[in-house]
Image: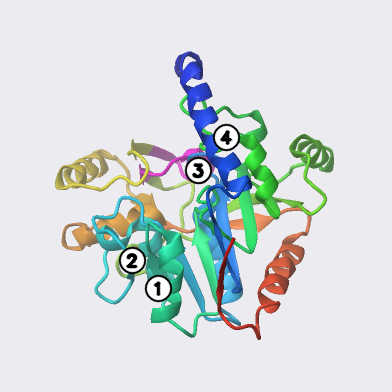
């Protein structure tokens, strides 16, 4: 029913697609200007509106790079209550910088986490305030063409490849399919763990990568849940009943995981980036109390967890856990992918920071 309704919106998709195509063409013809940096800038993004695994991919890159380099992330700070450029500090909250940057800030104490709507302005500000920075990861910036990153990583979901999608609002695309040509690396995310070589080859043939592009495949892996406040881990098993609290774009992989690993679960689903209210809190507590089980927990995503931290006093007595998520590369390609990232950054190891505008 919903799918049929979205197809009725196809004329609006044509209009939106034409606008996006024109904007891209103006950048291609240098009518609209973009800036490149003599500095390692990595962009992680997608063509769709969300749910492809950008946050765990950014975390993957942070974990890889910060072993050798002073690393920073730069995000728009979606749904934050502030404006302009900011760098996270010990007093920062999710309302100040947004939920995903706050998640990075909490998980990686040595990471510089910055937000700014205008990335062209924010990058020089970041380098001015943190001059020792050696690499910047742009989170969700593929469609923002005022900055031309040195390395573009494009994510597309296995069950909703951009090649099969439509422009919004009839589909999920916010950029035209031909924009994929700007990517250096394409990652097909949320694949089945038993994806066959034949299916992998068929998807690559469908994507039709350019000679400079490499296509990788990953599955989503969930780690041991930990308590929101005391960080103590727990295990979930067939004897566990679960209340799943979820405000992300695509909760289906998490739902599938929970279905396989617990006895039963109820779910409270919210919109992506939902700002939890006191009424939501009461609703969560009420639904949890209704669960008739000896062993029961509240399970949420790390992204939702940062928006629930403000209710620590109310929730500390509840068994509320966040579950980490990460990418695992299929077909033994993880080392190859990591090597490409490190080779890119290594090229700039002895270079001076500068900006060139074309």
Residue 293 lies left or right of residue 216; in this view the side is left
First of labels 2, 1 by sequence position: 2
Q: Nearer the viewer, residue 358 or 160?
A: 358
Name the outermost residue toward the front.
31
- x, y percent for residue 33: 53, 54
Mark earlier in primary sequence (3, 1): 3
The mark nearer the N terminus, 1 or 4, is: 4
Visual colour scheme? rainbow
Q: Quadrant of residue 160?
A: top right
Q: Earlier in the sequence, mark 2 or mark 3?
A: 3
* Visible residue check, residue 233: no
Which residue does the numbered mark 3 point to in the structure image?
51
Which region of the structure is painted magenta? 242-265
Look at the picture and state if 36 lies above or below 198: below
Element on which disc 3 rests: loop
Instruction: Give the CA distance from mark 1 to mark 4.
Output: 31 Å
Kindly identify which numbered label has been placed on residue 125: 1
Find the distance from the CA under tag 3 to the CA under tag 1.
30 Å
Query: Where is residue 32 drawn, in percent x and y?
Result: 53, 49
In the rendering, which numbered label is found on residue 276? none
User: Which residue carries the number 2 mark?
Assistant: 85
Is 186 colored magenta in this rendering?
A: no
Q: Which residue matches tag 4?
A: 21
């Amino acid at each position: 029913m919903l799918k049929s309704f979205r197809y009725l919106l196809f004329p609006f998709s044509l209009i939106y697609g034409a606008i996006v195509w024109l904007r891209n063409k103006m950048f291609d013809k240098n009518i609209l200007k973009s800036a490149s940096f003599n500095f390692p800038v990595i962009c992680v993004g997608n063509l769709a509106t969300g749910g492809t695994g950008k946050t765990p991919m950014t975390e993957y890159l942070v974990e890889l790079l910060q072993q050798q380099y002073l690393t920073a992330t730069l995000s728009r700070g979606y749904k934050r209550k502030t404006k302009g450029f900011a760098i996270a500090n010990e007093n920062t909250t999710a309302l100040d910088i947004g939920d995903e940057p706050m998640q990075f800030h909490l998980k990686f104490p040595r990471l510089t986490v910055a937000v700014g709507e205008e990335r062209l302005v924010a990058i020089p500000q970041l380098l001015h305030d943190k001059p020792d920075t050696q690499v910047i990861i742009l989170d969700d910036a593929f469609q923002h063409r005022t900055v031309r990153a040195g390395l573009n990583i494009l994510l597309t979901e296995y069950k909703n490849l951009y090649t099969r999608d439509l422009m919004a609002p009839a589909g999920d695309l916010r950029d035209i399919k031909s924009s994929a040509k700007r990517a250096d690396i394409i990652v097909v995310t949320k694949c089945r763990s038993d994806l066959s070589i034949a299916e992998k080859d068929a998807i690559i043939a469908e994507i039709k990568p350019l000679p400079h592009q490499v296509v990788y495949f990953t599955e989503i892996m969930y780690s041991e849940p930990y308590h929101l406040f005391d960080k103590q881990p727990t295990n979930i098993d067939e004897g566990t009943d679960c209340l799943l609290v979820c405000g992300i774009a695509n909760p289906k992989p998490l739902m599938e995981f929970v279905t396989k690993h617990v006895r039963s679960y109820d779910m409270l689903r919210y919109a992506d980036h939902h700002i939890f209210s006191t009424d939501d809190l009461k609703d969560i507590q009420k639904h949890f109390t209704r669960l008739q089980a000896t062993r029961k927990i509240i399970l949420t995503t790390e992204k939702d967890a940062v928006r629930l931290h403000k209710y620590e006093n109310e929730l500390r007595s509840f068994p509320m856990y966040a579950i980490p998520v990460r990418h695992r590369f299929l077909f033994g390609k993880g080392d190859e992918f990591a090597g490409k990232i490190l080779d890119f950054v290594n090229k700039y190891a002895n270079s001076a920071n500068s900006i060139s505008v074309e």
